[in-house]
Image (spheres, rainbow, N blue to C red):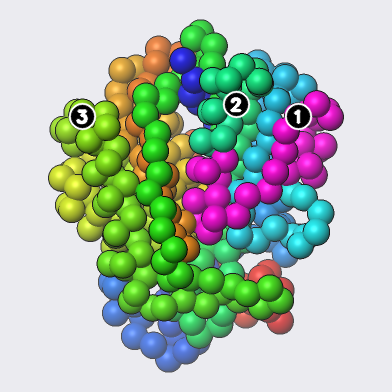
Amino acid sequence: MSGIVSYGTYIPRYRVKLSDIASMWQKDEAEIISALNVSEKAVPAIDEDSVTIGIEAGKRAFDKVNVKPTEIGCVYFGSESHPYVVNPSSSIVAQYLGIGNDYFAADLEFACKAATAGMQVAAALLESGKVKYGLVIGSDIAQGKPHDALEYTAASAGAAFILGNKANEVIAEILNMSSFTSDTPDFWRRDGMKYPSHFGRFTGEPAYFTHVINEGGKLLEESKLKPSDFDFCVFHMPNGKFPRAAVKKLGFTHEQLAPSLTVDKIGNPYSASSLMGLAQVLDIAKPNQKIFFVSYGSGAGSDGFIFKITKNISKIKNNYPVSKQIEDKTYIPYATYLKHMHII
């Protein structure tokens, strides 16, 4: 058995309303909010970056269980906004968390699925017997160019997951995992460019839906399970509309999806997006329930997992549920948002 032993999340408390962004650019706020199904997004403090956010999420993951940081055998940090081009985020996080020196480490980049790729690597190392525990973090200070469509949803948050393979510790067993990948350049940022570029509506059908639906279908076929066999489903959330549409295409229901929807209130924190949804589901999950999970990363690819909740979920101490973090917020005006993002 390998799977999730613990998890932690961190959402910066600052928020900017989409209505304020729309007003700045003299856009119809009701039309934008309706089109995206997002009302506000999380913004970092002026001294926060993806590493500090990842550290906070990691600390909360360790707070829930009795795993010693020095027992971690691998650290994978997925992000699109590493603070250094040369100087790994994974080693900074590991040093701060007290993991020591005896661990595999890498910074991963695959757009918004960088961290779920790390989960696959960590699970493989666990199954090979090379490590006792693995730490995977998805954290981003998502950036959107002012007056670009991304500005309305690009958000900030972090999610950390400790993986292990002890039957008396795993809270969510990995029953299946697979991926669907292609060269589909819907979203990119060349070296030296401050903001990403994208192909607008092309990011929908040829990119997000092609990969999420194909991976989801493959996961169902390989597991020989039906949508009705699951209690929850979680998808990457670039906006509020896409996961809701993916649910219908794959045959799931809104009731299975609703507990995972964090995008409506915090936006899309890129590498932390689908993992934040997974964490919110784990906050309320019960033994023997199943979770269907598909991430997405532009470029493009999707990673799929099937999790089964174990009786160990009752042992988890949860002082920082995702829902509480979402509601712990302070609104800031658009000009302050620009300062926090170091745009002005």
Q: Earlier in the sequence, mark 3 or mark 1?
A: 1
* Relative image position of residue 266 (x, y in whole percent): 47, 57
- Residue highlighted by disc 1: 103
- Residue highlighted by disc 3: 225
In this rendering, which labeled residue sits more in front, label 2 or label 3? 2
Q: Report the side of 155 relative to 236 (left or right).
A: right
Q: Quadrant of residue 265?
A: bottom left
Q: Earlier in the sequence, mark 1 or mark 2?
A: 1
> Please, what secondary structure does the residue beneath circle 2 have?
helix
What is the distance, in whole Å, between disc 3 and disc 1 at their CAs? 36 Å
What residue sits 46% from the left and 76% below the top?
198
What is the distance, in whole Å, between disc 2 and disc 3 at their CAs? 26 Å
What residue sits 60% from the left and 26% below the top?
125
Stretch in magenta: 90-118
Amino acid under label 1?
A: Tyr
What is the distance, in whole Å, between disc 1 and disc 2 at their CAs? 11 Å
Q: Nearer the viewer, residue 43 or 146?
A: 146
- Residue highlighted by disc 2: 125
What residue sits 41% from the left and 78% below the top?
199
* Relative image position of residue 196 (x, y in whole percent): 56, 74
